[in-house]
Amino acid sequence: MIKHLLSALSPENALELQKACGDKDSRGRLCDLTYSLSRSENVAEIVDTFSKPLRIFAIIIVAYVANRLVRFFVKRSVKNLAKEKSRARFRQLKKHTGLARLETSENPTYRTVQRAQTIGTALAGVATFAVSVTALLLILGTYHIQLGPLFAGAGLIGVVVGFGAQSMVRDFLAGIFIILEDWYGVGDVIDAGEASGTVELVTLRATRLRDQYGVVWYIPNGVIQRAGNKSQQWGRALLDIGVALDTDIDFAQRVIKETADALAADANHATEIISEPEVLGVEEIGTDRIVIRVIVKTTPASQWKIARELRARIKTAFDEQGIELPPPTAPASYRDAMGPNTGVPKR
């Protein structure tokens, strides 16, 4: 339609159109259509002035809506994984394909949801990047900027930057395998070599930990050579209880076992202990003490809480039964504990 209208223009009108809208290769169709309908150079110039900003505004709006829609569908897909129907289908699929053997958690559906959330976050980021780049290219095309030289220059820069971005690529690849192989997830307590603590965030680029002092550590995934997960599947509270050398070993072990069993039967801690406590026996005989080892299998990340509670109860039980602890080996005074004698006279 526009071509038909333009073909009917006289040479004088064609010249006015060129003045109002620019050269044929660079002017917009809206300006052509406006002049063809109005035959007014001023109206065409006004439309041409506002057409490009309006197009850029439309591109930005469409890009924003597209980005929100993609992120919504990714979030919805991750949320659907938490539903019982979806989890049942996943369990059936894993049984038929043998993937269930690769699970490293006794609660695989929870770990699956965690991994899906992490991957969903990564996909949302990739989608945002792709939509943003597409919108930028369309905006550049609106002003008829030649993209060939830009891509050529970007290619040269990319080669240079690529050598410096090797560590970033390594981090992304390591992050993919960490997530897929389920090394750890959000909420796990891990020892990552560089730092130890609770995992707060796992991305394809890095892992964020918070240690016991509240310090936040950001560790690139590429430098994590090994990771010790202290809260996967189950935990174990392991206590080495020292007693005096002249202690009746059988009696001490019986008191420890009864105390641990009472803790396991306590309604406040029964859900955190998943098997009967075991007293393994004498672990060490020293010059001033005998060490008895006891272990309690717990739910993930509960071993430290159970260990602290069991130590307190064993100390109370020893006091009640008259079982003596080893003689102290710590410095005799607080001043000695601070370090060597500095020459300050004692008061």
Image (cartoon, rainbow, N blue to C red):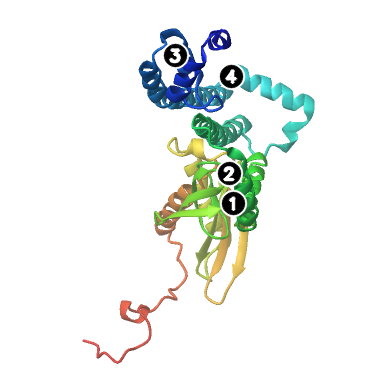
Tell me whether the residue at label 1 lies in contact with that at label 4, contact meaning CB atoms closer than 8 angstroms: no
Secondary structure at badge 4 equals helix
Give the quarter of the image for residue 82: top right
Which percent across, then down, holds residue 161?
A: 60, 55
Secondary structure at badge 1 equals helix
Amino acid at circle 1: Asn
Q: Which residue is mark 3?
A: 35
Q: Which tag is nearer the camera, tag 1 or tag 4?
A: 1
* Position above or below: 47 against 135: above
Mark pair 1, 3: CA separation: 59 Å
Amino acid at circle 4: Glu
Tell me whether the residue at label 4 lies in contact with that at label 2, contact meaning CB atoms closer than 8 angstroms: no
Among numbered discs 2 and 1, the one appearing first in the sequence: 2
Of 125 and 278, nearer the camera is 125
**The N terminus lies in quadrant:** top right
**The C terminus lies in quadrant:** bottom left
- Specify the label residue 235 is tagged with: none
Tell me whether the residue at label 3 lies in contact with that at label 4, contact meaning CB atoms closer than 8 angstroms: no
Which percent across, then down, holds residue 282?
A: 61, 62
Q: Which tag is nearer the camera, tag 4 or tag 2?
A: 2
Which percent across, then down, holds residue 45?
A: 39, 22
Q: Which tag is nearer the camera, tag 1 or tag 3?
A: 3
- Specify the label residue 84 is tagged with: 4
Tell me whether the residue at label 1 lies in contact with that at label 3, contact meaning CB atoms closer than 8 angstroms: no
Mark pair 2, 1: CA separation: 32 Å
Mark pair 3, 2: CA separation: 33 Å
* Position above or below: 146 against 252: above
Q: Which residue is mark 1?
A: 221
Secondary structure at badge 3 equals helix
Q: Which residue is mark 2?
A: 150
Of 205 and 126, nearer the camera is 126
